[in-house]
Image (cartoon, helix red, strand yellow):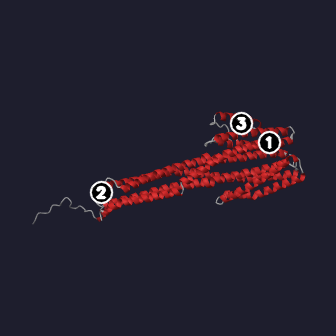
Amino acid sequence: MGNPQVPGPDAGATRPGPAHRRPPQLTRAWWNTPRLVRGLAALCLTTLLGCAAATALVLSGARDGMDAIGHRAAPQAVRAADLYFALNDMDAQAANLLLLGADPDYAGLRKQTLDTYEQRRTQADTDLQRAAEAAADDPAGRQAVQTVIGELGHYEAQVARAQLLEEQAHAPAGRPSPEALEAYRQATDLLRQQLLPAADRVIAANSADVDRIHAAQQGDLASGRWWMLGTGALALAALAVLQRILTVRFRRLVNPPLALATLLLAAGLTAGVVLVSRAEDHLAVAKSNAYDSVLALSRARAAAYDMNADESRYLTDPARAGAYERTFLDKTQSFARLDGATLTTYDARLAQAANRHRADHRTVPFGGFLGAELGNITFPGEQDAAERVLTAFQQYQRDDRVMRDLLDKGRLKDAVTFNTGLAAGQSNADFTALDNALGDVLTINQGAFDRTVAAADDDLGAATAATGALALTAALALTVLGVRPRLREYR
């Protein structure tokens, strides 16, 4: 009987079966050189595509955002403000027609006033048509536009009736017939209660769109830059590792196609980051520097024309003179706000505030639309042009007090002549100077807005997309070209 066998150290132990073995892809032995090169090449191609996709998404989003602001929402808001201005000036001219009456001394001015009324009516119709097209996908904006369209015809009919009754009455200047005055009251009440609030809603809706798109784009560009840099860093790292593997295992100093692909990726990534930074700059200039001023100035211009209309209404309708004086002050405060100022104290307080501002342009001691503009000076020539607006506005306000003083002294026709006159030193001549000054500042800011939008279009247009696509195709091809000859050595 032989000796019993002594169990070995592995006796009783369970040998690892197939279920306990690691997948071959996780073993070092499985990753031979061909598989390692193929895997790294696939990783390079994937990360290159990922970086390209992130860059394309960020830049296309920036393009869409600038397109929405530069070609849709901002121009629509400005057109709505232009509609508001046109409606206001229509009513100002209608009030002037009633104010001038049948006095032969104003025959030439009456014809000029009627021509201006017709021009503004045509302008309002054009603005309405564009606003209706722009509001097709906006229920609130579409409803507001439909309100203006529906009520504008009623307004024009009442103005035409007032003009007809005035002509039949042959009333003197400043004293329209009761029937003509009542027809005009109905027209101007319709304007103030229906037309102007509806136009203001269109402005507000488009301005809200601009603000929303601007805020969203700021966030998207900031986060998008990091996505681009992250995916770009992964692609560069993958290319660097692949280059290292080929250098070590194939004893090559450098792989030229992979080196070119790496340089191409670095250049493309740099260009993408630069384009994002430029898009951020374009967005800030277009919205904050230019558009905000354009809208404030457009609203200021509409308020100025409403002030001018209130003066004519004040002279035309003594029964409502107090109400028109209050609305004149309200529009004055919306133009350049001085809290607590009255018509009696406004000129002196504005002079003090203007002197403080002129001593230091960084100080803007009043609010309103003009305060917003003077606090947002950005472009060459804008400061001087805005200062001319302030000077012209001060003169126009002083003219208003002269007109009211003439009326208080019982000199109605002198007040009418001073208010409607276009000779140097008369109110409407000074108002024209104010309007021209506003137009100059508007032109500066609108030009800057248009140039910025055009520059953004160039940066993010089809040429950039085509260049990026070619660069991506070249980088992918170079990556494949860099590894293919090495893999052939294992066939």
Disc assigned to residue 321: none
The amino acid type found where label 3 is placed reads Leu
Q: Secondary structure at mark 2?
A: loop
* Tag 1 residue: 423
Q: CA distance from mark 3 to mark 1?
A: 25 Å
Q: Secondary structure at mark 1?
A: loop
Name of the residue lying farthest toward the left: 1
Lower position in the chain sequence, tag 3 or tag 1: 3
Lower position in the chain sequence, tag 1 or tag 2: 2
Relative image position of residue 268 (x, y in whole percent)? 46, 53
Q: CA distance from mark 2 to mark 3?
A: 82 Å
Can residue 474 be seen from the camera position used here?
yes
Image position of 414 with respect to 132: above or below: above
Q: Is residue 485 left or right of residue 173?
A: left
**Picture quadrant of residue 259:** bottom left
Q: Residues within 10 Å of mark 1 (few under 14, many from 20)?
A: few
**Picture quadrant of residue 485:** bottom left
The amino acid type found where label 2 is placed reads Phe
Image position of 56 with respect to 100: above or below: below
Q: Is residue 410 left or right of residue 74?
A: right
* Tag 3 residue: 350
Residue mark closest to the camera, 1 vs 2: 1
Relative image position of residue 44 (x, y in whole percent)? 39, 57
Relative image position of residue 74 (x, y in whole percent)? 63, 52
Image position of 222 with respect to 8: above or below: above
Q: Residues within 10 Å of mark 3 (few under 14, many from 20)?
A: many
Q: Is residue 45 left or right of residue 143?
A: left
Question: What residue is shown at x 69% (from left), y 46% (from top)?
Answer: 439
* Tag 2 residue: 250
